[in-house]
Image (spheres, rainbow, N blue to C red):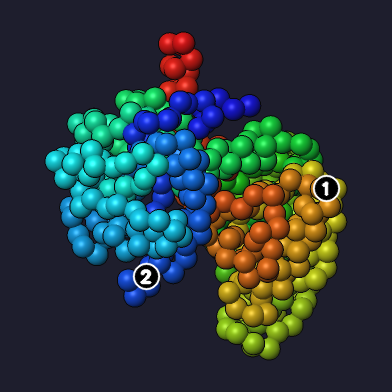
Amino acid sequence: MIDFLTLSDLSLNGKTVLLRADLNVPMKDGHVSDAERLHRLLPTLKELSEVGARIVVLSHFGRPDGTPNPKYSLRPVVAELERLWGKPIAFAEDCIGAVAEKAVQALQPSHILVLENTRFHAGEEANDPVFAKALAKLGDVFVNDAFSAAHRAHASTEGLAHLLPSAAGRLMQAELEALTKALAHPERPVAALVGGSKISTKLDLLNNLVARVDVLVLGGGMANTFLAAKGVAVGKSLCERDMLDTARDIAAKAAARGCDIVLPVDAVVATALQNDIATQTVAVDAIPADMMMLDIGPASAQIIKDKLAACKTVVWNGPLGAFEFKPFDRGTNDVAVAVADLTRQGKILSVAGGGDTVAALVNAGVSEKLSYLSTAGGAFLEWLEGKDLPGVAALRQSAAEQKKAD
Protein backbone atom coordinates (compact mmCIF):
# COMPACT_ATOMS: atom_id res chain seq x y z
CA MET A 1 0.00 0.00 0.00
CA ILE A 2 2.92 2.35 0.64
CA ASP A 3 4.07 4.01 -2.60
CA PHE A 4 6.57 6.42 -1.03
CA LEU A 5 9.91 5.97 0.71
CA THR A 6 10.34 6.29 4.48
CA LEU A 7 13.29 6.81 6.78
CA SER A 8 13.83 3.04 6.70
CA ASP A 9 14.64 3.19 2.97
CA LEU A 10 17.47 5.72 3.11
CA SER A 11 21.04 5.56 4.36
CA LEU A 12 21.26 8.69 6.48
CA ASN A 13 24.40 8.24 8.56
CA GLY A 14 26.56 11.32 8.12
CA LYS A 15 24.11 12.90 5.67
CA THR A 16 22.73 16.40 5.95
CA VAL A 17 18.95 15.97 6.02
CA LEU A 18 16.62 18.80 5.07
CA LEU A 19 13.62 18.04 7.27
CA ARG A 20 10.39 19.83 6.35
CA ALA A 21 8.48 20.11 9.61
CA ASP A 22 5.38 22.05 10.62
CA LEU A 23 6.44 24.52 13.28
CA ASN A 24 3.44 26.73 12.53
CA VAL A 25 2.08 26.43 16.06
CA PRO A 26 -0.28 28.69 18.04
CA MET A 27 1.41 31.46 20.02
CA LYS A 28 0.25 33.61 22.94
CA ASP A 29 2.26 36.44 24.47
CA GLY A 30 5.35 35.33 22.59
CA HIS A 31 5.19 31.71 23.77
CA VAL A 32 3.91 28.49 22.19
CA SER A 33 0.40 27.84 23.53
CA ASP A 34 -0.11 24.41 21.95
CA ALA A 35 2.98 22.27 21.34
CA GLU A 36 1.23 19.17 19.97
CA ARG A 37 2.83 19.51 16.51
CA LEU A 38 6.25 19.82 18.12
CA HIS A 39 5.66 16.70 20.22
CA ARG A 40 4.73 14.77 17.10
CA LEU A 41 7.94 15.82 15.38
CA LEU A 42 10.15 14.34 18.11
CA PRO A 43 10.17 10.69 16.88
CA THR A 44 11.59 11.71 13.49
CA LEU A 45 14.15 14.02 15.12
CA LYS A 46 15.18 11.24 17.51
CA GLU A 47 15.60 8.68 14.75
CA LEU A 48 17.61 11.04 12.55
CA SER A 49 19.81 12.02 15.49
CA GLU A 50 20.44 8.40 16.44
CA VAL A 51 21.74 7.52 12.97
CA GLY A 52 24.14 10.46 13.00
CA ALA A 53 22.40 12.70 10.49
CA ARG A 54 22.86 16.46 10.50
CA ILE A 55 19.30 17.72 10.84
CA VAL A 56 18.33 20.99 9.14
CA VAL A 57 14.71 21.90 9.87
CA LEU A 58 12.65 23.93 7.40
CA SER A 59 9.22 25.38 8.20
CA HIS A 60 6.88 28.25 7.51
CA PHE A 61 5.25 30.29 10.27
CA GLY A 62 2.23 32.51 9.73
CA ARG A 63 1.75 34.66 6.64
CA PRO A 64 4.58 37.18 6.32
CA ASP A 65 3.82 37.66 2.60
CA GLY A 66 7.25 36.85 1.27
CA THR A 67 9.25 39.34 3.31
CA PRO A 68 11.13 39.16 6.64
CA ASN A 69 8.97 40.18 9.59
CA PRO A 70 10.08 39.75 13.24
CA LYS A 71 6.46 38.99 14.17
CA TYR A 72 6.73 35.74 12.22
CA SER A 73 10.20 34.64 13.26
CA LEU A 74 10.62 30.99 14.22
CA ARG A 75 13.01 31.87 17.05
CA PRO A 76 10.35 31.64 19.85
CA VAL A 77 9.20 28.28 18.47
CA VAL A 78 12.78 27.00 18.49
CA ALA A 79 13.00 27.85 22.18
CA GLU A 80 10.04 25.57 22.93
CA LEU A 81 11.32 22.82 20.62
CA GLU A 82 14.70 23.00 22.39
CA ARG A 83 12.93 22.61 25.75
CA LEU A 84 11.13 19.50 24.51
CA TRP A 85 14.27 18.09 22.86
CA GLY A 86 16.33 18.59 26.01
CA LYS A 87 19.49 19.61 24.13
CA PRO A 88 20.67 22.77 22.38
CA ILE A 89 19.20 23.53 18.95
CA ALA A 90 20.94 25.97 16.64
CA PHE A 91 19.06 28.69 14.77
CA ALA A 92 19.95 30.59 11.59
CA GLU A 93 18.54 33.99 10.69
CA ASP A 94 17.81 32.95 7.09
CA CYS A 95 16.87 29.77 5.25
CA ILE A 96 19.03 30.29 2.14
CA GLY A 97 22.21 32.13 1.20
CA ALA A 98 25.45 32.71 3.07
CA VAL A 99 23.90 32.84 6.55
CA ALA A 100 22.15 29.48 6.13
CA GLU A 101 25.14 27.87 4.41
CA LYS A 102 27.52 28.90 7.19
CA ALA A 103 25.14 27.53 9.85
CA VAL A 104 24.79 24.22 8.02
CA GLN A 105 28.57 23.89 7.63
CA ALA A 106 28.99 24.34 11.38
CA LEU A 107 26.37 21.70 12.22
CA GLN A 108 27.68 18.53 13.85
CA PRO A 109 26.30 14.98 13.29
CA SER A 110 23.18 14.20 15.37
CA HIS A 111 22.60 17.91 16.04
CA ILE A 112 19.67 20.08 14.95
CA LEU A 113 19.59 23.41 13.16
CA VAL A 114 16.36 25.30 12.51
CA LEU A 115 16.40 27.77 9.63
CA GLU A 116 14.31 30.95 9.66
CA ASN A 117 10.77 31.06 8.23
CA THR A 118 10.74 29.87 4.60
CA ARG A 119 7.91 32.32 3.87
CA PHE A 120 10.27 35.24 4.44
CA HIS A 121 11.04 34.61 0.75
CA ALA A 122 8.37 35.02 -1.97
CA GLY A 123 9.88 32.03 -3.76
CA GLU A 124 8.51 29.67 -1.11
CA GLU A 125 4.80 30.06 -1.83
CA ALA A 126 5.49 30.58 -5.56
CA ASN A 127 7.33 27.23 -5.60
CA ASP A 128 10.08 29.08 -7.44
CA PRO A 129 12.69 26.65 -8.87
CA VAL A 130 15.54 29.04 -8.06
CA PHE A 131 14.47 29.24 -4.41
CA ALA A 132 13.98 25.46 -4.25
CA LYS A 133 17.51 24.93 -5.62
CA ALA A 134 18.89 27.34 -3.01
CA LEU A 135 17.28 25.19 -0.32
CA ALA A 136 18.43 21.93 -1.92
CA LYS A 137 22.01 23.21 -1.95
CA LEU A 138 22.00 22.96 1.84
CA GLY A 139 21.46 19.19 2.14
CA ASP A 140 21.92 15.70 0.77
CA VAL A 141 18.47 14.27 1.44
CA PHE A 142 14.95 15.68 1.80
CA VAL A 143 12.57 14.30 4.42
CA ASN A 144 9.01 15.66 4.52
CA ASP A 145 7.36 15.27 7.91
CA ALA A 146 4.75 18.01 7.43
CA PHE A 147 1.57 16.34 6.20
CA SER A 148 -0.34 19.37 7.49
CA ALA A 149 1.39 21.47 4.80
CA ALA A 150 1.29 18.82 2.06
CA HIS A 151 -1.73 20.40 0.35
CA ARG A 152 0.44 23.39 -0.58
CA ALA A 153 2.62 23.18 -3.69
CA HIS A 154 5.40 25.25 -2.14
CA ALA A 155 9.15 25.04 -2.63
CA SER A 156 9.84 23.40 0.75
CA THR A 157 6.92 20.95 0.49
CA GLU A 158 6.84 20.03 -3.20
CA GLY A 159 9.76 21.55 -5.08
CA LEU A 160 12.50 20.02 -2.93
CA ALA A 161 11.22 16.48 -3.48
CA HIS A 162 12.19 16.74 -7.15
CA LEU A 163 15.75 17.88 -6.40
CA LEU A 164 16.98 15.48 -3.71
CA PRO A 165 16.46 11.83 -2.70
CA SER A 166 13.23 12.11 -0.72
CA ALA A 167 11.27 10.23 1.91
CA ALA A 168 8.44 10.68 4.38
CA GLY A 169 9.23 11.27 8.03
CA ARG A 170 7.53 9.15 10.68
CA LEU A 171 4.68 11.63 11.27
CA MET A 172 3.97 11.95 7.54
CA GLN A 173 4.14 8.16 7.25
CA ALA A 174 1.70 7.68 10.14
CA GLU A 175 -0.77 10.18 8.67
CA LEU A 176 -0.69 8.59 5.22
CA GLU A 177 -0.98 5.05 6.53
CA ALA A 178 -3.93 5.96 8.76
CA LEU A 179 -5.79 7.80 6.00
CA THR A 180 -5.09 5.09 3.43
CA LYS A 181 -6.50 2.45 5.77
CA ALA A 182 -9.53 4.62 6.48
CA LEU A 183 -10.55 5.60 2.95
CA ALA A 184 -8.38 4.19 0.18
CA HIS A 185 -8.35 0.57 1.38
CA PRO A 186 -10.82 0.44 4.28
CA GLU A 187 -12.35 -2.49 6.07
CA ARG A 188 -16.10 -2.18 5.50
CA PRO A 189 -18.66 -1.05 6.44
CA VAL A 190 -17.22 2.48 6.56
CA ALA A 191 -18.92 5.36 8.37
CA ALA A 192 -18.09 9.05 8.11
CA LEU A 193 -19.20 11.62 10.66
CA VAL A 194 -19.28 15.10 9.18
CA GLY A 195 -20.25 18.17 11.16
CA GLY A 196 -19.72 21.87 10.86
CA SER A 197 -21.85 24.86 10.13
CA LYS A 198 -22.15 24.92 6.35
CA ILE A 199 -22.58 22.58 3.40
CA SER A 200 -21.00 25.21 1.13
CA THR A 201 -17.59 24.77 2.78
CA LYS A 202 -17.70 20.96 2.53
CA LEU A 203 -19.30 20.31 -0.85
CA ASP A 204 -16.29 18.46 -2.27
CA LEU A 205 -16.04 16.44 0.93
CA LEU A 206 -19.68 15.36 0.89
CA ASN A 207 -19.66 14.49 -2.81
CA ASN A 208 -16.54 12.37 -2.36
CA LEU A 209 -17.74 10.60 0.77
CA VAL A 210 -21.14 9.53 -0.58
CA ALA A 211 -19.21 7.56 -3.21
CA ARG A 212 -16.81 6.01 -0.70
CA VAL A 213 -18.62 5.29 2.57
CA ASP A 214 -21.55 3.12 3.58
CA VAL A 215 -22.91 5.41 6.31
CA LEU A 216 -22.72 9.22 6.32
CA VAL A 217 -23.69 10.83 9.63
CA LEU A 218 -24.39 14.56 9.40
CA GLY A 219 -24.46 16.99 12.31
CA GLY A 220 -24.03 20.66 13.07
CA GLY A 221 -25.52 23.38 10.93
CA MET A 222 -25.24 21.34 7.75
CA ALA A 223 -27.67 18.79 9.17
CA ASN A 224 -30.22 21.60 9.51
CA THR A 225 -29.89 22.35 5.81
CA PHE A 226 -30.45 18.71 4.88
CA LEU A 227 -33.49 18.59 7.18
CA ALA A 228 -34.87 21.77 5.61
CA ALA A 229 -34.32 20.24 2.16
CA LYS A 230 -36.67 17.45 3.26
CA GLY A 231 -39.32 19.98 4.26
CA VAL A 232 -38.59 20.09 7.98
CA ALA A 233 -39.17 23.49 9.63
CA VAL A 234 -35.98 24.21 11.58
CA GLY A 235 -37.00 27.46 13.26
CA LYS A 236 -34.16 29.95 13.66
CA SER A 237 -31.50 27.27 13.29
CA LEU A 238 -28.47 27.97 11.13
CA CYS A 239 -29.56 26.88 7.67
CA GLU A 240 -28.29 27.64 4.16
CA ARG A 241 -31.54 28.23 2.32
CA ASP A 242 -29.70 28.68 -0.98
CA MET A 243 -28.21 25.19 -0.65
CA LEU A 244 -31.42 23.16 -0.38
CA ASP A 245 -31.25 21.92 -3.97
CA THR A 246 -27.61 20.99 -3.44
CA ALA A 247 -28.52 19.02 -0.32
CA ARG A 248 -31.22 17.17 -2.27
CA ASP A 249 -28.72 16.38 -5.04
CA ILE A 250 -26.23 14.96 -2.54
CA ALA A 251 -28.98 12.91 -0.90
CA ALA A 252 -29.98 11.52 -4.32
CA LYS A 253 -26.37 10.57 -5.11
CA ALA A 254 -26.09 8.84 -1.76
CA ALA A 255 -29.27 6.86 -2.35
CA ALA A 256 -28.09 5.80 -5.81
CA ARG A 257 -24.77 4.59 -4.42
CA GLY A 258 -26.21 2.81 -1.39
CA CYS A 259 -24.86 5.30 1.12
CA ASP A 260 -27.09 5.68 4.17
CA ILE A 261 -27.33 9.36 5.22
CA VAL A 262 -28.12 9.64 8.93
CA LEU A 263 -29.77 12.89 10.08
CA PRO A 264 -30.85 13.91 13.60
CA VAL A 265 -34.29 12.79 14.75
CA ASP A 266 -34.31 14.99 17.84
CA ALA A 267 -32.68 18.29 18.72
CA VAL A 268 -31.50 20.28 21.72
CA VAL A 269 -32.89 23.77 21.11
CA ALA A 270 -32.56 27.19 22.73
CA THR A 271 -33.34 30.82 21.97
CA ALA A 272 -29.66 31.82 21.82
CA LEU A 273 -26.20 30.30 21.57
CA GLN A 274 -24.66 30.86 25.00
CA ASN A 275 -23.44 28.85 27.95
CA ASP A 276 -25.95 27.38 30.42
CA ILE A 277 -29.02 28.80 28.69
CA ALA A 278 -32.39 27.09 29.18
CA THR A 279 -32.85 24.30 26.63
CA GLN A 280 -35.50 21.90 25.38
CA THR A 281 -35.15 18.56 23.65
CA VAL A 282 -37.70 18.12 20.87
CA ALA A 283 -38.27 16.04 17.76
CA VAL A 284 -36.70 17.68 14.69
CA ASP A 285 -40.16 18.23 13.20
CA ALA A 286 -41.25 20.09 16.36
CA ILE A 287 -38.57 22.78 16.62
CA PRO A 288 -40.27 25.99 17.85
CA ALA A 289 -40.23 28.83 15.33
CA ASP A 290 -38.36 31.13 17.75
CA MET A 291 -35.66 28.57 18.68
CA MET A 292 -32.58 27.09 17.07
CA MET A 293 -31.16 23.58 17.01
CA LEU A 294 -27.74 23.66 18.67
CA ASP A 295 -27.04 19.99 19.31
CA ILE A 296 -28.31 16.55 18.45
CA GLY A 297 -30.61 14.99 21.03
CA PRO A 298 -30.12 11.70 22.93
CA ALA A 299 -32.24 9.67 20.50
CA SER A 300 -30.08 10.86 17.60
CA ALA A 301 -26.91 10.04 19.52
CA GLN A 302 -28.18 6.52 20.19
CA ILE A 303 -29.04 5.94 16.52
CA ILE A 304 -25.54 7.11 15.53
CA LYS A 305 -23.91 4.83 18.11
CA ASP A 306 -25.94 1.85 16.86
CA LYS A 307 -24.90 2.60 13.26
CA LEU A 308 -21.22 2.88 14.21
CA ALA A 309 -21.33 -0.36 16.18
CA ALA A 310 -22.13 -2.15 12.92
CA CYS A 311 -19.14 -0.59 11.11
CA LYS A 312 -15.44 -1.47 10.88
CA THR A 313 -14.01 1.93 9.97
CA VAL A 314 -14.99 5.42 11.15
CA VAL A 315 -13.74 8.74 9.77
CA TRP A 316 -14.68 11.93 11.63
CA ASN A 317 -14.50 15.57 10.55
CA GLY A 318 -16.53 18.22 12.37
CA PRO A 319 -18.49 18.35 15.65
CA LEU A 320 -22.16 17.35 15.79
CA GLY A 321 -23.25 20.44 17.72
CA ALA A 322 -22.06 23.80 19.04
CA PHE A 323 -19.69 22.01 21.42
CA GLU A 324 -17.90 25.19 22.49
CA PHE A 325 -20.96 26.09 24.54
CA LYS A 326 -22.31 23.88 27.31
CA PRO A 327 -24.58 21.96 27.30
CA PHE A 328 -24.41 21.77 23.48
CA ASP A 329 -21.37 19.49 23.67
CA ARG A 330 -23.33 16.53 25.03
CA GLY A 331 -24.21 14.95 21.69
CA THR A 332 -20.66 15.13 20.36
CA ASN A 333 -19.27 13.92 23.69
CA ASP A 334 -21.67 10.97 23.82
CA VAL A 335 -20.77 9.81 20.31
CA ALA A 336 -17.05 10.47 20.88
CA VAL A 337 -16.98 8.24 23.96
CA ALA A 338 -18.73 5.51 21.98
CA VAL A 339 -16.18 5.77 19.17
CA ALA A 340 -13.36 5.58 21.72
CA ASP A 341 -14.94 2.50 23.35
CA LEU A 342 -15.38 0.72 20.00
CA THR A 343 -11.76 1.54 19.16
CA ARG A 344 -10.53 0.22 22.51
CA GLN A 345 -12.47 -3.00 21.98
CA GLY A 346 -10.78 -3.46 18.59
CA LYS A 347 -14.09 -3.29 16.75
CA ILE A 348 -13.32 -0.24 14.58
CA LEU A 349 -10.45 1.72 13.09
CA SER A 350 -11.15 5.36 13.96
CA VAL A 351 -9.47 8.31 12.23
CA ALA A 352 -10.38 11.93 12.99
CA GLY A 353 -8.98 15.31 12.07
CA GLY A 354 -9.57 19.02 11.55
CA GLY A 355 -9.14 21.83 14.06
CA ASP A 356 -12.68 21.86 15.45
CA THR A 357 -12.77 18.07 15.52
CA VAL A 358 -9.56 17.84 17.54
CA ALA A 359 -10.87 20.47 19.98
CA ALA A 360 -14.19 18.63 20.32
CA LEU A 361 -12.49 15.30 21.01
CA VAL A 362 -10.17 16.93 23.56
CA ASN A 363 -13.28 18.42 25.19
CA ALA A 364 -14.80 14.93 25.29
CA GLY A 365 -11.65 13.52 26.88
CA VAL A 366 -11.01 10.97 24.12
CA SER A 367 -8.41 12.65 21.90
CA GLU A 368 -5.82 9.96 22.69
CA LYS A 369 -8.26 7.05 22.50
CA LEU A 370 -8.93 6.94 18.76
CA SER A 371 -6.80 4.95 16.31
CA TYR A 372 -5.40 8.14 14.83
CA LEU A 373 -6.03 11.84 15.40
CA SER A 374 -4.66 14.10 12.68
CA THR A 375 -3.41 17.56 13.61
CA ALA A 376 -3.55 18.56 9.93
CA GLY A 377 -6.41 20.89 9.06
CA GLY A 378 -6.63 21.75 5.38
CA ALA A 379 -4.53 18.77 4.26
CA PHE A 380 -6.75 16.33 6.16
CA LEU A 381 -9.87 17.86 4.65
CA GLU A 382 -8.48 17.84 1.11
CA TRP A 383 -7.48 14.19 1.50
CA LEU A 384 -11.05 13.36 2.53
CA GLU A 385 -12.24 15.33 -0.50
CA GLY A 386 -10.29 12.92 -2.71
CA LYS A 387 -7.76 15.52 -3.84
CA ASP A 388 -4.15 14.67 -4.65
CA LEU A 389 -1.92 16.57 -2.24
CA PRO A 390 1.11 18.11 -4.00
CA GLY A 391 3.53 17.28 -1.17
CA VAL A 392 2.44 13.64 -1.15
CA ALA A 393 2.36 13.34 -4.94
CA ALA A 394 5.96 14.63 -5.06
CA LEU A 395 7.07 11.94 -2.60
CA ARG A 396 5.39 9.28 -4.73
CA GLN A 397 7.06 10.57 -7.88
CA SER A 398 10.43 10.71 -6.14
CA ALA A 399 10.02 7.12 -4.96
CA ALA A 400 9.13 5.97 -8.47
CA GLU A 401 12.14 7.76 -9.94
CA GLN A 402 14.49 6.33 -7.33
CA LYS A 403 13.10 2.83 -7.90
CA LYS A 404 13.58 3.24 -11.66
CA ALA A 405 17.16 4.43 -11.13
CA ASP A 406 17.92 1.38 -8.97
Residue kind at label 1, given as amino acid type: Lys
Kindly state the secondary structure of the residue where label 2 is placed: strand
C-alpha distance separating marks 1 and 2: 41 Å
Residue 155 lies in what quarter of the image?
A: top left
- In the image, is residue 268 above or below residue 278? above
Regarding residue 49, the answer to whether it shows in the image is yes
Q: Which mark is residue 347?
A: 1
Residue drawn at x 66%, y 59% is 368
Residue 212 lies in what quarter of the image?
A: top right
**What crowding class fits label 2: few (fewer than 14 Cα within 10 Å), some (14-19), or many (20 or more)?**
some
Drawn side of residue 253 relative to residue 283, left or right: left
Instruction: Choose the circle earlier in sequence order: 1 or 2.
Output: 2
Q: Nearer the viewer, residue 209 or 174?
A: 174
Residue 53: x, y in percent?
40, 36
Residue 76: x, y in percent?
32, 64
Residue drawn at x 40%, y 56% is 87
Residue 253: x, y in percent?
67, 40
**What crowding class fits label 1: few (fewer than 14 Cα within 10 Å), some (14-19), or many (20 or more)?**
some
- In the image, is residue 380 above or below residue 295? above
Residue 273: x, y in percent?
58, 80
Kindly state the secondary structure of the residue where label 1 is placed: loop
Residue assigned mark 2: 31
Residue drawn at x 68%, y 68% is 365
Q: Nearer the viewer, residue 304 or 199?
A: 304
